[in-house]
Structures are given as structure tokens and as C-alpha cells.
Amino acid sequence: MKQLTMKFTMKQLTSILRLLFVIGTVCLSTFTTHADLWSTGYYPCYEQGSTKMPASQIDFTALTHIIHFSVYPNTDGTLSTSYQGLTLADSTDLVTRAHAAGKPVLICVGGGGSESAFEAATSTANLPVFINNLTNFMATRSYDGVDIDWEPVSSADYGQFTNLVNGLRSALNIFPQHKLLTVAAGAYKNSGSVSVYYGMYAALQSQFDQINIMTYDMSDTSLKATWFNSPIYDGNYHAPTGLAPSINVAVSNFVFYGVSPAKLGIGIPFYGYIWAGGSGTSTGGVTQPRQTWTTAPTVTTPSYTTIMSGYYQSNLYYWDTNAQAAYLSISNTNSANDMFISYDDQRACQSKVSYARNQGLGGVIIWELALDHQTGQPDPLLEAVKQALATPGLITIQNSGQDIALDFNGLPLGSYSVKWSGDLNSNVWNTLVVTNVSGPGGVIQVVDPDAVSQTQRFYRVQTPP
């Protein structure tokens, strides 16, 4: 929850005031609050090359945590650094720079397709060795914790997954300073019972500092219809295989089966999906969401940078209000060259920050930091996340005739409550207005017609209300 509190006297209102307020976690009202969102960015070691994204080019001010990707489990419980090419120099460079910026770094273990490796490494015989190797690796390279990325977690894995989490948390608790334990969790179950899958995370939630839901890669041709990579809502769209996946449904499942919202993070992908060609759609090839086909399209996953440099044109851009997702629609004379491109843009990133706040979630995660990066240029998506986390930020207060006007920035999907009090010590706050941002966001102006009758007025801008 974001809160800004401000005070002014009527004398001070003879000129325009621009005030920057420090956003804190202390609440002076009766509302329940928590620290604002975490922003956890994955940083693969294979992106650290000088031609990609050296650690020196990371904007640490946009992040609360960095996860270094990754080491890999060997079947005997040892660790492989060669799988992703993680060197000691990589670890030292990232950890040194992040710590200088006051940010913790976790080492990730695993990655896509790691299920069989984890199954072997967490067997009864190998689990103690595996945990010992993880904690030793973390400590010797000065990491601040461990991120588990076991993909996928099938129903047959639940027992060993649980043993790993409990054993690793116990081992981390031995350290004199708190060591973080986070997990990259699948948005939907891979197999078995829905209640058992989400219930497992509910039972383990006290062991984790963050349960980050991988709310991306949420659709492919198996859905039998075009859909978005990482939509916030399903818009009640039923594809041939069932209700389309969405962040909201995934989050609702975790919460319904007992996971505290404050433990959960949602994913922001810095890449998209290009659906190309196909046939038998309403437009020939695939060009839009919610299209079925007779011949399936091909699907590739380019970076945000590639999408913007190779495909983006303003006349091809659309925002899907029902799904809260961006896309490009490309139609050609030869339908084999048609494209539907689903991706997160700045508005999608900021909408997800608003959604996380509205739902009382813990934060957001980014996969991954280099995918919107070009040397010597701003990182547009990371900057959008950074701006969103700082919103509402700068407040302008000015006379508006006989009234007082307050201006502040609002995010897409944001909801803001402006409250006032005549006495800060009374802890009584009156609601002036609650405003919702259904569009792309921007400046919100709120007018207080009664302020002129008061000798002093305190204001609070709170999101969510």
C-alpha cells in the first residue's frame, strides 16, 4: 500500500507548491498496511558478456532483489556451474555491485526442464549432500539466499520438493544473518490434483520469503486458439480447450487454497510471443487474439527489444481491455506472413504493479533484465516498473479559484483514495474522493472545495484505497 501525507496552511497556498514526499511503511490511519512491493529481477549469467548486459549496466534502483541465474543440480547432489556458464568472476561482479547499491542477490538453482535433475538430487540418499552444496555455494560466493526453480513440479515430485524446501530452510536458518529462500512457482498445476498442488505451497509458505508465480508462457498452440503470453484477466474467454489462462485466475487459486497474498509475486516477461501464419482463421492467418485455426501457426519468443526494433509500428498496436494486455496485429496479402504478437509494454508493466497492489500481493518478478536492454539506451520496461513503484510520487498543490486542487500521477488499473484531516494527531481521516484509472494512466486532479474554510489541512493519497 502506498501512502503520501501532506500538510499545508492557507497562507502557503498563495503560490504553487511542488512537494516530494518520502514514501514509508508507517501508517497513521486505521488501515492495514504492509511494506510496498518487491521488484525481483532475474539476471542470467549468460547475459553478463560485454556485448550483452554487464552487471555495471543494471539499474539497481529499480529493483529490491536480484536473482542470479543459475547453477544446476547434478544427479548426485553436486552443482553444475557449466550448464549456464556461471563463473566465480560473474558472481563476484554482480554481488559486489548489488551490495554496494544495498540490494540482496540470491543464487538460483535449476531452470526450465530441470525436473529429472532435481528428482535425483533430492533423493533420500542425495538430499543432505545437495542442501550442503547449495548453502556452501551461496556462502562462499557471498549470496544472500537461494531461489528454487524446479520446472516442472509434477505430482510425483511433491514429497521430494517439500523435503528440499524444509531441509534448505533449516540449513539457511543456521546462518547468523537471515538468508532468503524464494521459489519460482508454476502458475497452474502440471499434473495431479489442483487442491494438492496449491495446498503444497500453502503448507510451505512460512518457509519462503517470496513465492513468485511464473505468470508467463501462459499459452501456446495447445490452447487451440491465439491468446496472450501474460494477461492479467481472462476476459471470460473460453478457448476450445477451456477457460483461457490468466494471472488473476492463477493468483486466485493460490489464495483460495491458503497462500497469503503478501507471499505472492506475479511475473512480468520482458519478451513476447510471435504467432505467425496458420490458416483457416477469420482473417486468413493469425492476426488477433481469440482466433481458432485449421492449420496451426508457428510460435517464437523474441525479446522486447527485438519486437520493438523489428515489428512495432504504432498503427499495428492494440490494447485489449478485457485481458489487460498489449499486442500487435499484422495482416499481409499472403496470409502465411500474418502475425499476432503478444507482449508486455510499459502500460502492461504498470498495470501489473497496480494489480499487485490492488490484490495485496507481495510484489512482481521480471524475466529477465537483459531482454529490454541496449547498451547506452534506457531500459524502457524496467524504467516503467521503476516509475510505477514510485507512483504517485510528486504532488502539486495549488489554488483553483476558491478551491484547492491536488495533482498526482496515477497508474493504469490504479485506484487512489484522497483523504483529509484537520488534525494529524486525531488519527481521523475523511475521504475526499476515490478515483480509479481505467485508461493508460496519467495526471489525476482532485479538487477540495471545502479547504478554504480550514486553517490547516492534511492530505493523504493512498493506493489501493
Image: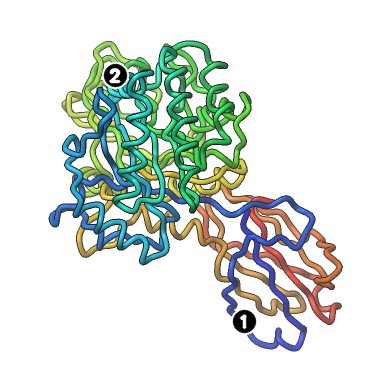
Secondary structure at badge 2 equals helix
Judge whether 281 appears above or below 264 on screen.
above
- Amino acid type at image mark 1: Leu
Q: Which mark is residue 17?
A: 1
| Residue 59 in view, yes or no | yes
Q: Position of residue 287 (x, y in %)?
A: 30, 29
Q: Residues within 10 Å of mark 1 (few under 14, many from 20)?
A: some
**Residue at the left extreme?**
51
In the image, 66 versus 303, the foreground residue is 66
Q: Is residue 425 left or right of residue 246?
A: right
Q: Pointer 2: what residue?
A: 116
Q: Position of residue 168 (x, y in %)?
A: 44, 34
Q: Residues within 10 Å of mark 2 (few under 14, many from 20)?
A: some
Residue drawn at x 51%, y 42% is 209
Q: Position of residue 1 (x, y in %)?
A: 63, 53
How far separated are the C-alphas under marks 1 and 2?
Answer: 61 Å
Residue 57: quarter of image: bottom left
- Amino acid type at image mark 2: Ser
